[in-house]
Image (spheres, grey):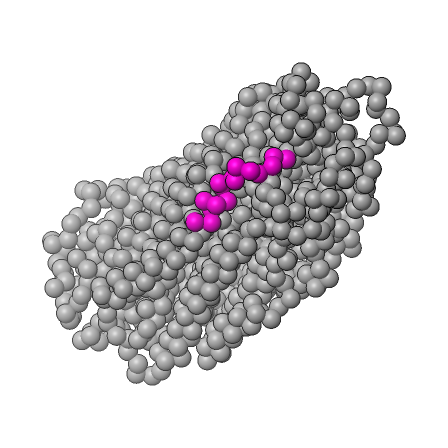
C-alpha cells in the first residue's frame, strides 16, 4: 500500500513543485514569447498525461494487488482499445508539433529589415562587429586573424573598412528593432546564448550561423557560452546592453572602425573604447588569466 | 485455437545438435570460458566495476556543483574530465555492455531454447576485447595529462586542442582507441546474439512466441550493429586528425593566437556521425529495458502482457524510426534550419509507438493479480521515471522549444531520467528477478526494499527539480556557476540538495552490492522456478543451468511466453514447454 501512496504523492508533489517552486524562467526580453507559449502548451499536455498514467497505475496497484484467491483476467488483446489509444496519442502529439513548427518557421525566417550584427567567439571571450555607414559587413576569414586583426576582417575589402569593432567589450543594441546576429568562431565551437532572449545558436569555425530576435526592453543582459569550449567555458561571459535609440547612437559614436583600429599611428591607450562595465572587466581579467595558464 | 502440436509450428532453420566445446581445466571453465552464461557474468561484473568508477565521478561532480569553491582539487580541468568519463562509461561501458553483453548472453540462449550462442569462441573473444577496451579507458586516468575532458560527445575541434584537458595529451587518443576496441568487441558479440535468435531457436519457438526480453535485446543488437560503424568511422577520422594532422573535422583554426595547419574539415560532420550512432544508442539501451520490464510486469502481475503483437511491432517501429531522428540533438548546431522541420516531425512520431508500450504496460496491471515483489516495484518505478523522462523529450524534440532549453540542465535532467534512471531501475529489477536462476539463491528482501525505495525516490528527487534549473537557463557543463546573473541563491540551495540526494542514492548502491555478494552464500534457496514463470530459462533441469542449458533433450515449445492465469488451467501459469490445450487461448498466431 505504501506504493499506492507514494505514486499519488509523486503526482501531487510534482504538480505542486511546478506551481509553487521559485525556479522558473527569467523575465523575457525579446519577441520570442511564442516559444514560452509553446513551452506552456507542452507543460499542460505532458502534465496531464503524466498524472493520468501514474494515477491509473496507482489505482491498478490498489485495486488489483494480490490477495488470497485472486486470479488475473486473461485478455491478450483489445484491438478497439489499442486503436483508440493510438489515435488519442497521435492527436496529442500533433497538438504539440503543429504550434512548435509554426513558431520554428518564424524563428528561421529573418525579417528583411533586420540589422546585421556579427558576434565573434574565441576561447574565452566575445567580440562584436557592426556594419558601418555603408550598412554592409566586410568579408572575413579565419586565415586573416593576426594579433592586429583579431577578428580576421579581410584587410582589402572596402566594405569592411568602416565596420565598427567591439573587441572583448560590451555590445549595445537598440530596443525594438529586429537584429540578425551572424555568429562566427575562430577556434572551437561556442554558443551565443542570452537566457532572457530565449534564443541560442552554435558558432562553428569556418561557417557563419545566425538567428534573429527583437529586443523588447532595455537593460543589461549577460551572454553565456552554451557549447562546451574547453576549460574556460564556464567563465566565458559577455554583456549585451539594450539601449534606447538615443543612448545606442551615443554609444555607437564612441566606437572605432576597422580602418581606425588597423592604422598603426592611432593605436594608443587614448583610443581604448570606453564604457566597459565592471562585469566585463572581471570577465576579461579571468579570460586572460586562463589563456596564460593554458600557454 | 492455439496451435499445440510442434508439428504445426514453423521450425526455425534446420540446425542439428552441435557438440559444444567442453572445458578441460579451471581456466577454460571459468576464465576463458565459451559458455554464454559465464561470459554474461564476466560482462556484468566488468560493467559493474567500471560503473562504480562512474558513480564516484558523479559524486565528485556533485561535490563541485553543490558546494562550489569548497573542494580545491576539483579544478575546471578535473571537472570536465569527470563529466566526460562519467558520461562515456555510463552510456557505453556500463549500459550497453550490461544489457547486451550481460543480459543478452545470459538470457538469449536460455530463452530461445538453445544450448549456447551459435559461435561460442567468437563470443568469448567479444568479452576479452571489451575488457581490453575498459582497461585502455581506465589507463587514461594514469596517462600524462589525464583523461579527456571533451564531454562525452567529444565534439571537435575542442576535443583535440590544447584548451581542453587531454586534447593534446594522451587522453583523447586513449578514449578514441578504447571506443574502437569496444566496437570491435561488441560486433563479435552482437553478431552472435542476432544469429542465435534467428538460427538457434528450439522447435516450436516461432518469432511470435519469443519473450519480449528477447525481442528487445535482439532489435537493440541489430540497431547497434548498424549504428556503431558511424561512431567507428568518426573515431578513426578524429584519431587521424589528432595523431597525423589530417583535416577531416578541422577547418582553418586559430589556437591561442597561432594559426594551425588544418584546413577544409567540417566540425559539424562529426556531429552527424556521432548522433547517427548516438540517437539509436538511446534505444539500444531502452529497447532491452522495454523488453525486460514487459516480462517482469507480466510475470509478477500473473497476467499475459497486454497487446503482445503491438508490443513487438512497437519495438521494431521504434528501432527503425530511431535512425531518422538523430539531428534533433543538433537543432542549435548551426545545421540548415529547414532540417528542424523534418527531424522534429520524425522525433515526435516516435512518441506514438513509445506511448503504446506504456499503455500496454499499465493495461497489463489492469485486472491483474499484482504481487508487489521487488522486481515488480522496480518495474513500477521504471514506468514513472520513463514516462516522466519521455514526456520531457517531447519538449526537446519539438525543435523551437529546444532552442531555449538545449544545452541547459533541462537536457541533463531529461536524459538522466529517461536513459539513466529508467533503464537502471529495470536492470535492478532484472537482477532481483534472475539472480535466483544465476546463483540458485534469492537476494535478501529487506535489503532489496531499502535499496528500492532509496534509489527510486532519491533519483526522482535528484532529476525532477533539475529540469527547473534548466528552465531558468542554467547551462549544462559549467564547472562553476558563479558570476551569473540568472543564478539565484535559491538555485544554489537546490543544487546542494541535489548533491546530498546523489550521495544518499550512491550509498544505497553499496547496500545492493553487499546484497549481491552476501546472498551468493546466505540467500534463501530459490529452487528452479521461484516466480512460477513460463519462459524456458525457468524450466532448466538444473539451477544454475549447467553447460548446455537443457540436459539431454532440448525443450519443445508449445505456446507463447504469456500463458498466465489461463482460464481452466489448474495453475496460474503454463510454461512454454508444456503441451496441451487448456482453454480458448487467444494467443496471437
Indicate the quadrant where residue B441 lies.
bottom left
- Magenta span contains residue A113: yes
Q: Nearer the viewer, residue A72 or A27?
A: A27
Q: Is residue B290 visible?
A: no
Image quadrant occupied by the N terminus of chain B: bottom left
Q: Is residue A11 visible?
A: yes
- Magenta part of the chain: A102-117
Q: Nearer the viewer, residue B272 or B448?
A: B272
- Image side of residue A183 versus residue A102, left or right: right
- Image side of residue B290 versus residue A287, left or right: left
- Image side of residue B543 versus residue B3, left or right: right
Image quadrant occupied by the C terminus of chain B: bottom left
Number of numbered discs: 0
Picture coordinates of residue B409, whole percent (x, y)? 60, 53
Q: Residue furthest top?
A: A156
* Residue at x-position 44% and y-position 51%: A100
Picture coordinates of residue B69, whole percent (x, y)? 78, 53
Q: Residue furthest bottom?
A: A68
- Magenta span contains residue B524: no
Q: Is residue B442 above or below residue A118?
A: below
Q: Nearer the viewer, residue B560 or B333?
A: B333
Q: Residue furthest front?
A: A246
* Residue at x-position 76% and y-position 39%: A251
Picture coordinates of residue B270, whole percent (x, y)? 51, 32
* Residue at x-position 64% and y-position 26%: A134
Q: Is residue B417 above or below residue B176?
A: below
- Image side of residue B200 versus residue B48, left or right: left
* Residue at x-position 85% and y-position 19%: A265
Amino acid at each position: 500500500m505504501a506504493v499506492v501512496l507514494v505514486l499519488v504523492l509523486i503526482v501531487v508533489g510534482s504538480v505542486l513543485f511546478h506551481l509553487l517552486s521559485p525556479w522558473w524562467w527569467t523575465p523575457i526580453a525579446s519577441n520570442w514569447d511564442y516559444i514560452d507559449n509553446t513551452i506552456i502548451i507542452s507543460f499542460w499536455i505532458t502534465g496531464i498525461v503524466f498524472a493520468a498514467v501514474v494515477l491509473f497505475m496507482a489505482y491498478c496497484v490498489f485495486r488489483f494487488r494480490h490477495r488470497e484467491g485472486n486470479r488475473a483476467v486473461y485478455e491478450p488483446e483489445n484491438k478497439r482499445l489499442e486503436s483508440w489509444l493510438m489515435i488519442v496519442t497521435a492527436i496529442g502529439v500533433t497538438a504539440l508539433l503543429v504550434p512548435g513548427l509554426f513558431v520554428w518557421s518564424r524563428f528561421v525566417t529573418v525579417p528583411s529589415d533586420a540589422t546585421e550584427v556579427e558576434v565573434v567567439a574565441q576561447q574565452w571571450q566575445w567580440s562584436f562587429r557592426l556594419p558601418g555607414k555603408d550598412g554592409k559587413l566586410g568579408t572575413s576569414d579565419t586565415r586573416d586573424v593576426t594579433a592586429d586583426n583579431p577578428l580576421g576582417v579581410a584587410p582589402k575589402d572596402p566594405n569592411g573598412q568602416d565596420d565598427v569593432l567591439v573587441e572583448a567589450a560590451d555590445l549595445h543594441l537598440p530596443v525594438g528593432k529586429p537584429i540578425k546576429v551572424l555568429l562566427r568562431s575562430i577556434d572551437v565551437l561556442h554558443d551565443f546564448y542570452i537566457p532572457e532572449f530565449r534564443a541560442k545558436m552554435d558558432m562553428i569555425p569556418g561557417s557563419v550561423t545566425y538567428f534573429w530576435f527583437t529586443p523588447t526592453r532595455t537593460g543589461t543582459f549577460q551572454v553565456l557560452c552554451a557549447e562546451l569550449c574547453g576549460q574556460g567555458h564556464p567563465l566565458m561571459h559577455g554583456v549585451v546592453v539594450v539601449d534606447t535609440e538615443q543612448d545606442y547612437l551615443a554609444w555607437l559614436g564612441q566606437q572605432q572602425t576597422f580602418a581606425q583600429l588597423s592604422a598603426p599611428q592611432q593605436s594608443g591607450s587614448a583610443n581604448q573604447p570606453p564604457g566597459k562595465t565592471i562585469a566585463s572587466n572581471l570577465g576579461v581579467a579571468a579570460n586572460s588569466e586562463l589563456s596564460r595558464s593554458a600557454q | 485455437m492455439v496451435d499445440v502440436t510442434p508439428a504445426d509450428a514453423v521450425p526455425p532453420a534446420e540446425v542439428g545438435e552441435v557438440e559444444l566445446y567442453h572445458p578441460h581445466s579451471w581456466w577454460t571453465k571459468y576464465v576463458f570460458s565459451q559458455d554464454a552464461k559465464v561470459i554474461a557474468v564476466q560482462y556484468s561484473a566488468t560493467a559493474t566495476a567500471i560503473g562504480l568508477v562512474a558513480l564516484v565521478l558523479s559524486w565528485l561532480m556533485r561535490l563541485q556543483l553543490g558546494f562550489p569553491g569548497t573542494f580545491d582539487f576539483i579544478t575546471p580541468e578535473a571537472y570536465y574530465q569527470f563529466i566526460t568519463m562519467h558520461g562515456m562509461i555510463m552510456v557505453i561501458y556500463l549500459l550497453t555492455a550490461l544489457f547486451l553483453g550481460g543480459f543478452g548472453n545470459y538470457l538469449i540462449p536460455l530463452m530461445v531454447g538453445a544450448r549456447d550462442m551459435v559461435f561460442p569462441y567468437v563470443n568469448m573473444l567479444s568479452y576479452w576485447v571489451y575488457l581490453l577496451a575498459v582497461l585502455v579507458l581506465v589507463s587514461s586516468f594514469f596517462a600524462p595529462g589525464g583523461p579527456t575532458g571533451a564531454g562525452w560527445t567529444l565534439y571537435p575541434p575542442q576535443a583535440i586542442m590544447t584548451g581542453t584537458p587531454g586534447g593534446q595529451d594522451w587522453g583523447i587518443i586513449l578514449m578514441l582507441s578504447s571506443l574502437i576496441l569496444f566496437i570491435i568487441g561488441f560486433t563479435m558479440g552482437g553478431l552472435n546474439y542476432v544469429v542465435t535468435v534467428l538460427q538457434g531457436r528450439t522447435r516450436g519457438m516461432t518469432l511470435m512466441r519469443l519473450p519480449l526480453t528477447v525481442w528487445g535485446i535482439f532489435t537493440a543488437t541489430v540497431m547497434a550493429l548498424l549504428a556503431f560503424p558511424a561512431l567507428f568511422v568518426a573515431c578513426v577520422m578524429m584519431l587521424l586528425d589528432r595523431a597525423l594532422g589530417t583535416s577531416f573535422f578541422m577547418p582553418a583554426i586559430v589556437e591561442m593566437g597561432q594559426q594551425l595547419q588544418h584546413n577544409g574539415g567540417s566540425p559539424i560532420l562529426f556531429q552527424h556521425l556521432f548522433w547517427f550512432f548516438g540517437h539509436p544508442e538511446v534505444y539500444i539501451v531502452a529497447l532491452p529495458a522495454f523488453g525486460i520490464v514487459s516480462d517482469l510486469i507480466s510475470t509478477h502481475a500473473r497476467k499475459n502482457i497486454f497487446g503482445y503483437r503491438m508490443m513487438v511491432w512497437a519495438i521494431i517501429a521504434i528501432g527503425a524510426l530511431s535512425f531518422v531522428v538523430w539531428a534533433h540533438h543538433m537543432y542549435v548546431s548551426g545545421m540548415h534550419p529547414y532540417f528542424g522541420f523534418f527531424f522534429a516531425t520524425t522525433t515526435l512520431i516516435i512518441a506514438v509507438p513509445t506511448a503504446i508500450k506504456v499503455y500496454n504496460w499499465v493495461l497489463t496491471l489492469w485486472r491483474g493479480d499484482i504481487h508487489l515483489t521487488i522486481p515488480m516495484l522496480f518495474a513500477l518505478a521504471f514506468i514513472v521515471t520513463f514516462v516522466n523522462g519521455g514526456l520531457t523529450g517531447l519538449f526537446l524534440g519539438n525543435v523551437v522549444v529546444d532552442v531555449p532549453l538545449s544545452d541547459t540542465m533541462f537536457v541533463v535532467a531529461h536524459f538522466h531520467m529517461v536513459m539513466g534512471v529508467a533503464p537502471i531501475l529495470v536492470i535492478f529489477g532484472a537482477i532481483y528477478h534472475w539472480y535466483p536462476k544465476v546463483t540458485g539463491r534469492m537476494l535478501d528482501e529487506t535489503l532489496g526494499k531499502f535499496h528500492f525505495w532509496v534509489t527510486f525516490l532519491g533519483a526522482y528527487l535528484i532529476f525532477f527539480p533539475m529540469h527547473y534549473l534548466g528552465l531558468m537557463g542554467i547551462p549544462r557543463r559549467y564547472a562553476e556557476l558563479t558570476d551569473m546573473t540568472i543564478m539565484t541563491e535559491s538555485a544554489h540551495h537546490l543544487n546542494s540538495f541535489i548533491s546530498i540526494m546523489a550521495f544518499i542514492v550512491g550509498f544505497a548502491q553499496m547496500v545492493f552490492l553487499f546484497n549481491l555478494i552476501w546472498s551468493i552464500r546466505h540467500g534463501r534457496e530459490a529452487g528452479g522456478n521461484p516466480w512460477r514463470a513460463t519462459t524456458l530459462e525457468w524450466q532448466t533441469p538444473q539451477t544454475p543451468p549447467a553447460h548446455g542449458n537443457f540436459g539431454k533433450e532440448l525443450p519443445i515449445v508449445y505456446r507463447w511466453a504469456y500463458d498466465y492465469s489461463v482460464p481452466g488451467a489448474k495453475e496460474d501459469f503454463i510454461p512454454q514447454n508444456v503441451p496441451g490445450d487448456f482453454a480458448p487461448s487467444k494467443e496471437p498466431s
